[in-house]
Every structure is written in structure tokens, then in C-alpha cells.
Image (cartoon, rainbow, N blue to C red):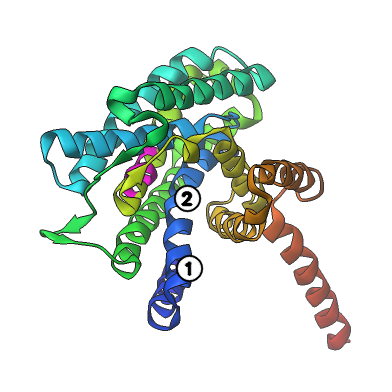
Amino acid sequence: MVRIPLLIAILVACLVTGGDYAISLAVVIGLQALPALGLTLLTGYTGQISLGHAAFYGLGAYGSALIGTALGLPALLSVIIASALVAGIAWAIGWLVFRLRGHHLAMATLAFGIIVQIAFVEMHFLTGGPNGLSGIEPLSIFGKDLITDAQVLPVVWGAVILAVLFAQNLISSPAGLVMRAIAEGDKVVGSLGNDVAAIKRKVMMLSGFLCAVGGGLYAHYVGYLSPGPFDVGFSVRLLLMVALGGFANIWGVLFGVAFVTLVGEALKPLGAFDVIAYGTLLVVSVIFFPRGLMAGIAEPVVAQARRFRKVAAR
């Protein structure tokens, strides 16, 4: 649990000593950490590949914005309601796609992501189409609007910390053991009397909920939505974040999100071609760093340090 105080200390240091740009990056990292954590539970711990999580992120964003505007609800309440609805959609999608396996499953989730993104473009009466949706109310607490990045950062990272704690407790529970067993071989799990399909759908529902929370917070943070940020490229980046952090590593995912976000800032001059760079980085990570970039770098260093201590002890 020492990692939580350390993370809080880093965030406080960022608020106190960081400039506006650094604080803004920290907010963006937190917003993307939520869907990445959701994908980790589904892909890393349950072994189900998804290339459509950008859709859940976008549904949470548009849903929260539309609910808040139509019903006049506070932003955080709109986020919760929209996320619950998206969780139901994720359960339904899981009911359909988990009949498939392997690359067929990946293609089905990819198709879902493309369909949703096209819907964002074509449904002008709801989403504003390519022109986007504006006038979204900002996040607020006790009636006070959170306008600056420094005000938004504690809310976003508070949600991330809660998600991390929940994910850690889940994977340490008996349900988490079943999830890991499904990743290794769902037929064995099914032979022990477990409803494998139902478990997969529940994990998909939880994963979609976390994505939607991140999307809802994003909508009220930027105040404007367009279909662009919710395309297939974002799904690829999410998968890259999980791969770099380690597919079954909750804290490693936060590293992966930060790494990809910073690399994304460096790749901005490439424009649309940055997807090629992300795809290449994903392939390299999976081949050469199967346990994640952080583990791939840290483990040799730790091993060398142990050898040095043994030599020094002699």
C-alpha cells in the first residue's frame, strides 16, 4: 500500500512545483488511466482481447454530456448515470462477442468500435456530427465549478486511485483467481461448474464502466466533444498502454499510460501517421517485452544488483 501515498506525493509535487503544461499532462494521463485499467481487467487478467474500448470511452463522454444537458444534473452525477448505462451496453456486447475467440473476437470488438465512431459522426441531432458538441458544463463540487487543471486533477486522480484499489481487491479475491484461470484456459474453469460466459460478461461490464467514467470526466473537462478522439487509433493506444505496463500489472498500466501519453506528445508532428508508430511500438513491446516495458527494464537491473551483492559478500 506504500504505492498509494507515493502516488499522492507525486501528484501533490506536480500541483505545487509543476507548471500549467505539466498539470495538464497529469490530468490527461489520469483520464486515460481509467479506460486502460478497465482494459487490463478484461485483457490482462481475463485474456479477452478488445479493440473497441474507445467506443465505451466515447459513449461515456457523449452520454454524460447529453444527460447533464437534458436533465440539468450536476456533472459528476451525469458521469455516474452515463457510466451505468454504458456498463449495460458493455454487458450486451459481451453477450454477443464472447461467442467468439482469438482474432475473431478482436475483429468483432474492432467492428463495434468502428460502428460507434461512425454513429458519432452521422447522428448530428445528438452528437453534432463532425462539428462536435459544445456547451458542456464543467465538473463541479458543492456547486463550485472546477475550471483550472489544478482544480480538476484531484477529482480525476481520486477516481483513478479508487479504480486501482478496487482492481487490486478484485484480482486478489476468489473472483480474480477465476478471471486468471479463464485467461489460461476457460474450458477447465467451465468443467469446474463456473459459468465462464457470465464471468466474461461481468468483466466486460466492469471494464466498460471504467472506460465510461474516464470518458465522462473527459467530456466535462474539455467542454467540447468531437468524434475524432474516440476512433480505432485510441483503442490501439489503450492496448499499447496495457502491453507496455504489463498485461497483468495494475500499477504497470499507470506507467504504460504515462509513457504512451508522453510519446504521443513527441509524435504530434506526425499527425495521422502516429498510428503507425503506435502499432510498431505495440508489436515491439509484445515480442521483446512480454511482461511489460517496466518489468523488462527493471528485472535485468535487479538481477545485476543481486549478482553484485553476492560478489561483494564474498
What secondary structure is found at the residue carrying circle 2? Answer: helix
Report the front residue among 52 and 96: 52
Q: With respect to residue 256, does 186 lie above or below?
A: above
Find residue 3 and name its label.
Answer: 1
Check if residue 215 falls in the magenta segment: yes
Amino acid found under the numbered disc labelled 2: Gln
- Tag nearer the camera, 1 or 2: 2
In the orientation shown, which residue stands out farthest toward the front?
Answer: 131
According to the picture, the residue beneath numbered tag 2 turns out to be 32
Q: Is residue 26 above or below residue 43?
A: below
Write down the region rendered in magenta: 212-217
In x, y percent, where is residue 293? 71, 56
> Which residue is at the front of the view, 109 or 263?
263
Which residue is at a point 47% across and 50% down the rendered structure image? 32
- CA gap between label 1 and label 2 equals 19 Å
x and y, in percent, of residue 102 in the image: 67, 21
State whether the magenta stretch is mostly helix, strand or loop.
helix
Left or right position of 296 against 268: right
Q: Which image quarter: residue 299?
A: bottom right
Q: Name the quadrant of the C terminus.
A: bottom right
Residue at (23% x, 54% y) in the render: 139
Asked if residue 68 is among those painted magenta in the image, a careful observer would answer no
Query: Which of the pair 175/23 is nearer the observer?
Result: 23
Residue at the location (66% across, 46% down)?
A: 243
Q: Residues within 10 Å of mark 1 (few under 14, many from 20)?
A: few
| Callout 1 amino acid | Arg
Image check: 38 left or right of 154? right
Q: Residue at coordinates 41% horizontally, 49% vertically from top-left? A: 169
- Residue 24 circle label: none
Q: Is residue 38 left or right of residue 187?
A: left
